[in-house]
Image (cartoon, rainbow, N blue to C red):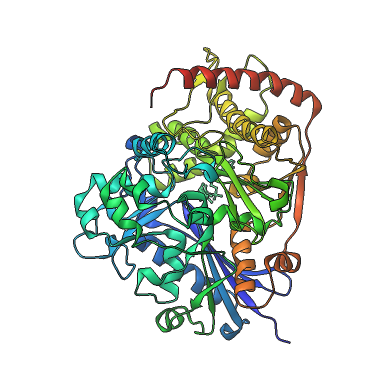
């Protein structure tokens, strides 16, 4: 029988990556990366206000570019044998849409309005709305709709973003028929949907970010939503009732996109999902394994059989959702709002004088491209010591344990000798200490962790960060082989949706790419980091104790 192929499309924060995969063995035939041009130019964002928006054209251009590039790199593959496509994206990254499901930024009069664009997961302009949602959820007297999302609603999530934009911009409030997650919009484009109410919504997105749960019949009630804004209550009936896992077909590739991409309308498009959850599948997640998806942020993923977790509510994480990772199992998510982003923040700090100097742009780019690697090398050479600088990883708030996006970062122990490598080392230790706080929360909540698997851009790029992580956690960290694990996981979902495999576990067994490196803890480092971790905890308590939301 001829080999059959699928495409996984992984939308990250800075770029979209597509991979063409042979379903018989999970071999990557080709891959392509597209950096969002408007995002790279910093358009529509105001970091000082924690405003991060992305234009839908960045996504559409990246979709066409990466899929066509993957196919062009594999002329030997007959497009008719590309049987499925699954899309994973960041989340919660919603956008206001009209009745056809078109983002308002693609409609007349809204082309340059950031409120009409995708409100990126890391956008924290809705901090106050999230606080209001938490306060009402605890006091209104009805169901606590946050209970399956760790008990604390985040400004990174669906309802807080919608409420903020609705209050902030009347033109959007009046023009928005509904709202779509990024992971729901792209598949709807590929199937040619022109009716937002017909879009099959992602279980992963709805369960982890929109307080959707079957026990209360789907989304929170109109009565509850009305506590915040009558327009939110009115929106509920224009959103969705049912949700679907990513192994389910949304429809076939439409004529227009089949022609644009050079594929067949026989190609199945599955329901979308989030990048971290697809990544967990891509690295063959199983019970008692914590998968750390380490990119600009981190997502910490676990799966558990229902009879193991039962009705236990795991406090202070990003939710526990039926089928959000592997259909038939509970998906649990935690994470850090800034992981690689903390290192990028420090890189940008050191780059300021270069960016503002009279230096040729290409030289500036060369310097920028080298900074993290050169700082990593110098920082790794600094001995671990209790006297070292200590920092927090909360530069973009704290996602888990116990979401609090109003928090900010901090650094202590600076002396006249504290140079850039010393502070960069503190940044690396901070993101690893933040990871330890999450591992400890899972364990304290009774969720056993037997092994750690690492994946994502940072896992593949930095021995220094990975060794520090193994030392801080005092556990081996096994690194997945695939450079594009979320896209590979998406491809696995696509193989099931296209009917090539009966279920996700079978697809994983056939298509998994395995692991290529393990970092083992070094005993003397473990002991030293344990002391430094105590300082991290103390600094965190001081900062949290001095912050008003
Ligand atoms: N050599 C490096 N060491 C540590 N972190 C790095 C290195 N190079 C890039 N990074 C970080 O990797 C992150 C991007 O990872 P990636 O997985 O591509 O991102 P995304 O979150 O968009 O999927 C950025 O935050 C960047 O700061
Ligand atoms: O939060 C989620 C998924 O739940 C991620 O999409 C978000 O952290 C962004 O992840 P990346 O850092 O872009 O990989």
Residue 283 in the image, given as x and y percentages of width and height: 69, 56
Residue 345 in the image, given as x and y percentages of width and height: 46, 35
Quadrant for the C terminus, please. Answer: top left
Residue 201 in the image, given as x and y percentages of width and height: 47, 64
Residue 351 visible? The answer is: yes
In this rendering, the count of numbered labels is 0
Q: Is residue 502 left or right of residue 163?
A: right
Towards the viewer: 19 or 437 = 437
Residue at the spot x=42%, y=53% of the render? 93
Towards the viewer: 112 or 547 = 547
* Up-down relation of residue 402 to residue 111 (above or below): above
* Up-down relation of residue 385 to residue 111 (above or below): above
Q: Is residue 488 left or right of residue 269?
A: right
Residue 42 visible? The answer is: no
Residue 47 in the image, given as x and y percentages of width and height: 36, 38
Residue at the spot x=35%, y=63% of the render? 57
Residue at the spot x=36%, y=61% of the render? 56
Q: Is residue 400 left or right of residue 287?
A: left
* Up-down relation of residue 68 to residue 357 (above or below): below
Q: Which corner quadrant of the image does residue 325 belong to?
A: bottom right
Quadrant for the N terminus, please. Answer: bottom right
Q: Residue furthest front?
A: 141
Q: Residue furthest right?
A: 523
- Answer with the quadrant where ligand 1 appears in the image: top right
């Amino acid at each position: 029988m001829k080999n059959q192929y699928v495409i996984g499309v992984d939308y990250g924060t800075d770029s979209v990556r597509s991979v063409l995969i042979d379903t018989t063995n999970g071999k990557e035939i080709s891959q392509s990366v597209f950096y969002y041009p408007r995002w790279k130019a910093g358009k529509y964002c105001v970091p000082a206000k924690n405003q991060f928006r992305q234009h839908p054209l960045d996504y559409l251009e990246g979709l066409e570019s990466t899929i066509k590039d993957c196919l062009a790199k594999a002329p030997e593959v007959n497009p008719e044998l590309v049987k499925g496509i699954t899309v994973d994206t960041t989340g919660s990254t919603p956008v206001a849409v009209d009745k056809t499901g078109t983002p308002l930024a693609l409609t007349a009069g809204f082309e340059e309005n950031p409120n009409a664009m995708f409100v990126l997961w890391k956008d924290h302009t809705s901090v106050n709305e999230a606080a209001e949602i938490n306060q009402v959820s605890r006091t209104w007297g009805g169901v606590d709709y946050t209970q399956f999302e760790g008990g604390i609603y985040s400004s990174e999530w669906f309802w807080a973003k919608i409420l903020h934009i609705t209050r902030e911009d009347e033109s959007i409030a009046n023009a928005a028929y509904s709202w779509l997650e990024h992971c729901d919009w792209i598949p709807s484009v590929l199937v040619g949907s022109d009716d937002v109410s017909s879009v099959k919504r992602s279980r992963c997105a709805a369960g982890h970010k929109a307080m959707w749960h079957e026990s209360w019949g789907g989304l929170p009630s109109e009565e509850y939503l009305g506590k915040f804004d009558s327009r939110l209550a009115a929106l509920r009936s224009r959103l969705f009732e049912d949700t679907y896992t990513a192994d389910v077909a949304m429809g076939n590739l439409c004529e227009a996109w089949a022609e644009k991409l050079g594929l067949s309308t026989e190609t199945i498009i599955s329901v979308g999902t989030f990048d971290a959850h697809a990544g967990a599948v891509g690295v063959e997640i199983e019970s008692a394994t914590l998968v750390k998806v380490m990119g600009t942020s981190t997502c910490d993923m676990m799966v558990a059989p229902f009879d193991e977790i039962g009705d236990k509510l795991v406090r202070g994480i990003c939710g526990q959702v039926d089928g959000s990772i592997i259909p038939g199992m509970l998906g649990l998510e935690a994470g850090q709002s800034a992981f690689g982003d903390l290192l990028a923040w420090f890189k940008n700090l050191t780059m300021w004088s270069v960016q503002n100097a009279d230096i040729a742009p290409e030289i500036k780019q060369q310097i920028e491209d080298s900074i993290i690697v050169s700082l990593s090398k110098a920082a790794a050479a600094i001995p671990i010591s209790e006297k070292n600088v200590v920092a927090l990883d909360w530069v973009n708030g704290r996602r888990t344990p116990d979401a609090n996006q109003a928090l900010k970062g901090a650094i202590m122990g600076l002396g006249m000798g504290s140079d850039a490598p010393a502070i960069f080392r503190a940044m690396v230790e901070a993101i690893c200490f933040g990871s330890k706080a999450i591992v400890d929360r899972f364990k304290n909540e009774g969720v056993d962790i037997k092994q750690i698997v690492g994946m994502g851009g940072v896992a593949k790029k930095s021995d220094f960060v990975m060794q520090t992580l193994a030392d801080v956690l005092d556990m081996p960290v096994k690194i997945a082989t695939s450079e594009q694990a979320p896209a590979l996981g998406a491809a696995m979902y696509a193989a099931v949706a296209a009917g090539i495999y009966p279920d996700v576990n079978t697809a994983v067994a056939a298509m998994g790419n395995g692991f290529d490196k393990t970092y083992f803890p070094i005993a003397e480092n473990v002991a030293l980091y344990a002391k430094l971790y105590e300082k991290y905890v103390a600094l965190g308590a001081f900062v949290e104790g001095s912050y008003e939301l």
